[in-house]
Image: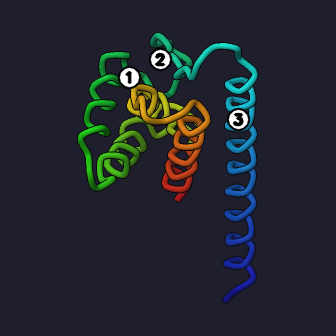
Amino acid sequence: MTTMQNTNRAVRGMVRSRISFALVGTCIAIFIAAQTRASAFECPVAHERTDNLAIKETPAQIAQLSEQLEADQTGNTTIDTIAELERKYPKAGSGEIVNYMVTAYCPIVAKNASLSDEEKEARLKRYSQQVEALAIQ
């Protein structure tokens, strides 16, 4: 392996580490905020479309994705949606993709009455980590 290949590999690793660190920090902040609230488990709210957002999906599109995720037994919807978002919105960072996917997945978890708030938070965190791993590949 040449020095240039080693350098490129090292740079890619540092970029992934920085992205992962930033996303982990964001997730931790979200879950700390969720745990300090006096109210029950809540999902993130879909933001209105603006020019400065890389992903410009509507709340109706997010709701449709939520239904698709709920019906999916294979996990392929998550993988396919991430790939589609990356093609459709090449300027979107992995953090934005994770936030979008978690916003769509959260209502599925929230309506599961058999889970406690802590279990819902754990399930959402696990999904967030899975999406993050897929989005930075």
- Local SS, label 1: loop
Can you tell which quarter of the image residue 125 is in?
A: top right
Q: Residues within 10 Å of mark 3 (few under 14, many from 20)?
A: some
Q: From the viewer's perspective, tell me whether residue 1 is left or right of residue 113.
A: right
Foreground residue, 128 or 95?
Answer: 128
Foreground residue, 40 or 3?
Answer: 40
Q: 57 above or below 133?
A: above
Of label 1 and label 2, which has the lower sequence position?
Answer: 2
Q: Are marks 2 and 3 in contact (CB under 8 Å)?
A: no
Numbered badge on residue 20: none
Query: What is the x, y in percent for residue 117?
Result: 58, 30
Q: Amino acid at mark 1?
A: Glu
Q: Amino acid at mark 3?
A: Thr
Q: From the viewer's perspective, tell me whether residue 79 is left or right of residue 29.
A: left
Numbered badge on residue 46: 2
How far apart, in angstroms, are the residues tagged by discs 3 and 1? 21 Å
The total number of labels drawn is 3
- Local SS, label 2: loop
Foreground residue, 17 or 41?
Answer: 41
How far apart, in angstroms, are the residues tagged by discs 2 and 3? 17 Å
Q: Nearer the viewer, mark 1 or mark 2?
A: 2
The residue drawn where x is 50% and y is 38% is: 97
Q: Residues within 10 Å of mark 2 (few under 14, many from 20)?
A: some
The residue drawn where x is 46% and y is 40% is: 90
Query: In the rendered view, how is the structure colored?
Result: rainbow
Q: Amino acid at mark 2?
A: Ala
Foreground residue, 42 or 27?
Answer: 42
Numbered badge on residue 26: 3
Residue found at the very far bottom of the displayed protein: 1
Q: Are marks 1 and 2 in contact (CB under 8 Å)?
A: yes
Q: 45 above or below 86?
A: above
Q: Which residue is mark 1?
A: 57
